[in-house]
Structures are given as C-alpha cells and as structure tokens.
Image: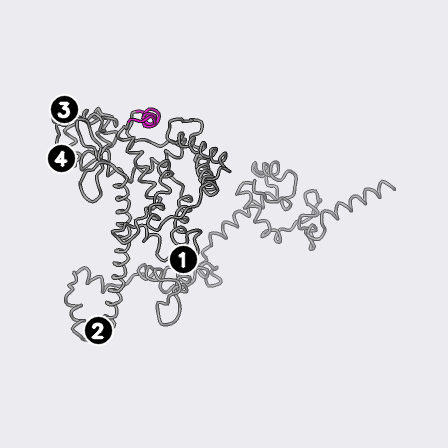
C-alpha cells in the first residue's frame, strides 16, 4: 500500500467523520440546520475524494468470480448506513457496479447481456442476488428509525428524543423547515414502514394510544381527529395505559356509535411486562424481530407487486382493445343482415318506455351542437368532405340561421330591423365626451381635464401612457376616428391650434410640418427681427 496521499486521506476521513457525527446528532450545530444543498454537496465531494484516495492508495487486486457478488453488494454498505445517499451518487455507484460486472472497468456500450433490474433480483427468482443500492440504503436507514422507536440506549437516540421529538411520537413529528438534510430524509421513510411497525402491548407505558399501531385497526389517529381527542380529556401523546382502566376503555361511550370501527377493538388486560416493538412482515400477520433483511424483503415484494400490477393493467387494456375490435368486426359482418346475430341483439334487450320515447323524439339544437363539438377538428361527420372544424366555425346556435346578425342590425332603409349594435352605440356616446373637451363645454369634469390631463395642450397632442387610467386611454383611442370629421370654423382664431386643429383643407398642418421645422422657422423669424 502506498503512502503518497496519506495526508489527503486523513483529511477526507476527518471531514467524513465530522459530517457523520453531525448527521447522527452527537455533535449537533443548530446554526447549520436547514442547509440542505450544502450538506448534499459535502456528501458528493467527500465521496469523490474518497474514490480518488482509494484509486491511488489501495493496491489493485484480482477478485475471483465467486467473490464478485459479495464485493459488489458490500462496497457501499458503510456509506448507506450513515445517511440517505443522493440519487446522483446512487446512479454513479450502480454504473460502476455494472462496469465491474460486465467489463471489469468502465462500462462500455453493448457489453451488458442482461438488464440490471433482472440481475438484482434474488437468486431464487433467477438473478444474482445483488442488492440495489437504493433499497439497501433505505433498509439500513430504517434501522436508525427502529432505534428511535425502541428508544435504544445510545447517545444519538437520547439526543433525538431530547432535542427533536421532545416527548412526541416519531410518527407525529412535524419536520421543521430548518431541519438538517439527513434527518429530513430519514423522516420521509416513515410512510413506507409505518404499517409494519407493530407494538406488542405489555404494561402500555411506552405505546402511544393514538399514534402507534397496536391493533389491526390502528393507528387510531386515522379516523379520530385531534380535536375530538382533546375534547374527551386526552392528548395526542397519551399512552395506552392512560385509556385503559380495569380492562375497560376510558373513551366516551358516544365514540362507539360515532366511530363504528371501535366496536372491533376488544379491551385488553395490561400486565407488568414492558411493551415490545416487533416487525410485521408483509406476507402475513407474523411478528418478527427487526432486521434489515426483513426490510429488503418488503421493498422487493412491493417492487414485484408494482411490476405485476402494471403488467396486469397493460394486459387487461390489451384484452379490452381486442374484444372491442372483435365485437366491431362481428357487428360489421352480421349486424345489419337478417341473421340470428341481429335478432339476438335486438330481442334480448328490452327497452324501458321512457328510453323508447327518447329514441323517437325530435332532436334538439343543443344535442346537435354537442354532437358536432365532440368530434375532432380533422374528422368529417358526413360524406361531403367538410370537417367538423368547418361546422364549428360556422355555428351560431341554430341549425339553419335565417338572417345574419349583421344584416339584422342594418337600418330599416337598407332592409334591416334597425337594431343598433352595442359597440357602435358605445363609441357614439363616448364621442360626446371628446366633443365636450374640444368645445370646452362648461363642466367641472371638462375643467378638470384641461387642468390635470391636458395642461394647456391640445387634445390631439396628448400621447397615451400606461400610467393613465383605463377610461382616459380608451377616450384617447377614439380621437383618430373622429379627427377627419371635426372641422374648426375660424373666427377670431383665439381658440384654434394652428398646427393640430383641422381648420383648412390641408389641416392638420402637423402631419405635413414636423415640430423641428416649426422650431427652426420660429428661431429664424426671431433672429431676423433682432437683426433688423
């Protein structure tokens, strides 16, 4: 073994040990809680440094084929037993394992003969028994959860109960936003194992009555709300010994009628033995001591169940499609002919009177519209070749519209009914406000417009801005429609804007002469007067 990088290896080991101590709580630092991304990056950096240290310091050795499975399954156990590994690291580790198995080095394309999922199944099912890193990581981290639940004698467990749980159940612990990344990930596994953690009741002093699973119907908090528990004089942290008295339940009698599930829970007699926490296997009701092997078996069975469920759903869907196609072919072949198949389909189904009346009644416009709009835009409902998009775009509520609405709204002199379009009436009425501003009608609103909006400017020169009110912007937008029709009859010329108002056939002059030309011309006139 080389000692070239001993300093780097010792530094990496110290960093890793400090991180592990912090993650397990024996040397916590409250000011560092909540830095999820920093802790995850530290894990990845330490993993990369350790990989480089092992590459340059460990003497390469040849491993027999019989020991390859053991090496592949054990090389990540230490890391997986400390914290939840990030998914990217799990993918990289499994990629290295695949490369070691098939290529004895980096993985090469086309070298894998069997999929990795098939290799990682147990040997009894045809695989090599290699354990998936993700499943192994969850199983090993479950052992930490088991230590917390069973209150194992450990400095870290004592710290978790004192500073994390503080007398509460692990199942009822609310993860704070500033919780450290490792404990947050570990607490996320609760939903996966909660149904398999069983409390065998002894004296009932260490079993939470509402939160732990000590009966088939448990935990009772699933159907009894916290408010109901508090109103009965209990708390969510009440132990089982607090709700049992002389072999009878202490909860209110009205709960039996309100929660029918309580009728199936028989009272139990407490004894002097301590409560025991056991692992309930997923295959049956057998209670066993906890082991990571049981958790791995549970994860594998759930994976197999999910895969079988998916395959069953796909097979059922394929069978349904096949039966639909088969029924359609049979109906096309013999459905319209005077055959036994036709008469069997007709006379074996008896229609109710209301259904028969519905089949012969007149079809309404709403039903036709619903049928048309339920067809895809690229489908043709008839042999004429017109798609449903054509009918949708031309639909106006009736099957055969008599006259278009635009024609109805024409004046009576032009053949219409003289109904005024709402938009046209709105524009005409709003034009009256523009006329009041131009003619300077005596009004408080007009005076306010000239004082705060126009500020001694011409109405035609005001530029609409986003900061203006919506109503004022809409009024300014109507100016261009009215401007060609507003002419100023010149009198004394005191109220006519020479460049903006329409007072001659060439007006407004601002459209022909720019403000820059006007400014230059005024400057020349002033300079000429000054020199003369």
Q: Secondary structure at mark 3?
A: strand
Q: Residue at x 24, y 36 (%)?
A: 290
Q: Secondary structure at mark 4?
A: helix
Q: Cα distance, mark 3 to mark 1? A: 68 Å
Q: Residue furthest bottom?
A: 338
Above or below for 282 versus 33: below
First-in-chain label (4 vs 3) = 3
Give the Cα separation between the discs numbered 4 and 1.
61 Å
Q: Nearer the viewer, mark 3 or mark 1?
A: 1
Q: Secondary structure at mark 2?
A: helix
Mark sitting earlier along the chain (4/1) = 1
Q: Mark 2 or mark 4, which has the lower sequence index?
A: 4
Which of label 2 and label 4 is nearer to you?
4
Specify the segment rendered in magenta. Answer: 153-166
The residue wearing badge 3 is: 245
- Give the residue displayed 22% in from the left and 37% down from the top: 279
Between circles 2 and 1, the one closer to the viewer is 1
Q: Is residue 529 magenta?
A: no
Q: Residue furthest front?
A: 1
Q: Name the quadrant containing residue 527.
A: top right
Mark 1 neighbour class, 10 Å CA radius: few under 14, some 14 to 19, many 20 or more? few
Is residue 70 or residue 119 the one in the foreground?
A: 70
Residue 520's spot in the image, x, y percent? 77, 46
How crowded is the residue under tag 4: few (<14 C-alpha within 10 Å), some, or many (20+)? few
Could you give the CA–CA distance between mark 4 and mark 3, rounded to whole angstroms?
Answer: 17 Å
Residue denoted by label 4 = 263
Nearer mark to the viewer, of 4 and 3: 3
Report whether 518 appears left or right of 248.
right
Residue 222 x, y percent position in the rendering = 24, 36
Q: Which color scheme does this rendered protein use?
A: one colour
For the point 22% across and 72% down, which residue is it?
335
Q: What residue would you read off at disc 2?
A: 334
């Amino acid at each position: 073994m080389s000692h070239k990088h001993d300093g780097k290896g010792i530094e990496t080991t110290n960093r890793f040990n400090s991180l592990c101590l912090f993650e397990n709580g024996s040397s916590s630092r409250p000011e560092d809680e909540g830095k999820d991304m920093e802790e995850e990056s530290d894990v990845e950096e330490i993993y990369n440094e350790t990989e480089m240290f092992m590459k340059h310091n460990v003497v390469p050795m040849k491993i027999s084929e019989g020991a390859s499975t053991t090496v592949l399954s054990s090389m990540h156990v230490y890391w997986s037993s400390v914290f939840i590994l990030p998914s990217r690291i799990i993918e990289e580790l499994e990629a290295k394992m695949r490369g070691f198995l098939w290529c004895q080095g980096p993985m090469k394309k086309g070298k894998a003969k069997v999929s990795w999922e098939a290799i990682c199944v147990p040997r009894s099912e045809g695989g090599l028994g290699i354990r998936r890193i993700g499943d192994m990581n969850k199983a090993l981290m479950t052992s930490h959860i088991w230590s917390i639940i069973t209150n194992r004698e450990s400095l870290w467990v004592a710290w978790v109960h004192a500073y994390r749980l503080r007398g509460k159940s692990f199942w009822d612990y609310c993860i704070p936003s500033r919780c450290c990344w490792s404990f947050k990930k570990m607490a996320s596994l609760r939903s996966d194992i909660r149904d398999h953690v069983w409390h065998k009741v002894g004296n009932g002093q260490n079993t939470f009555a509402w939160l732990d699973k000590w009966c088939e119907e448990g935990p009772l908090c699933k159907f009894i709300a916290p408010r109901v528990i508090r109103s009965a004089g209990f708390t969510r942290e009440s132990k089982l010994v607090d709700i049992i008295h002389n072999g009878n339940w202490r909860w209110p009698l009205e709960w039996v009628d309100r929660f029918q599930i309580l009728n199936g829970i028989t009272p139990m007699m407490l004894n002097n033995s301590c409560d025991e926490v056991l692992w309930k296997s997923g295959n049956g009701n057998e209670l066993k001591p906890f082991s990571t092997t049981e958790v791995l078996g549970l994860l594998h069975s759930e994976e197999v169940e999910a895969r079988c469920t998916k395959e069953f759903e796909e097979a059922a869907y394929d069978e349904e499609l096949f039966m639909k196609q088969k029924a359609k072919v049979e109906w096309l072949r013999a459905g319209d002919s005077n055959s036994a198949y036709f008469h069997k389909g007709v006379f074996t189904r008896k229609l109710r009177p209301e259904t028969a009346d519905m089949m012969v009644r007149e079809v309404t416009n709403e039903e036709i519209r619903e049928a048309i709009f339920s067809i895809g835009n690229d489908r043709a409902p008839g042999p004429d070749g017109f798609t449903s998009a054509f009918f949708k775009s031309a639909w106006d509520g009736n099957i055969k519209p008599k006259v278009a609405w635009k024609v109805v709204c024409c004046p009576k002199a032009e053949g219409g009914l003289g109904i005024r379009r709402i938009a046209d009436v709105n524009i005409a009425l709003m034009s009256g406000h523009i006329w009041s501003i131009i003619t300077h009608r005596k009004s408080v609103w007009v005076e306010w417009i000239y004082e705060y909006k126009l500020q001694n400017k011409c109405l035609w020169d005001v530029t609409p801005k986003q900061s203006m009110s919506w109503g004022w912007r809409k009024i300014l937008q109507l100016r261009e429609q009215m401007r060609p029709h507003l002419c100023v009859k010149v009198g004394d010329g005191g109220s006519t804007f020479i460049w903006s108002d329409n007072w001659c056939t060439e007006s407004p002059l601002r459209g022909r002469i720019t403000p820059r030309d006007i400014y230059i011309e005024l400057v020349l006139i002033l300079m000429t007067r000054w020199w003369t």
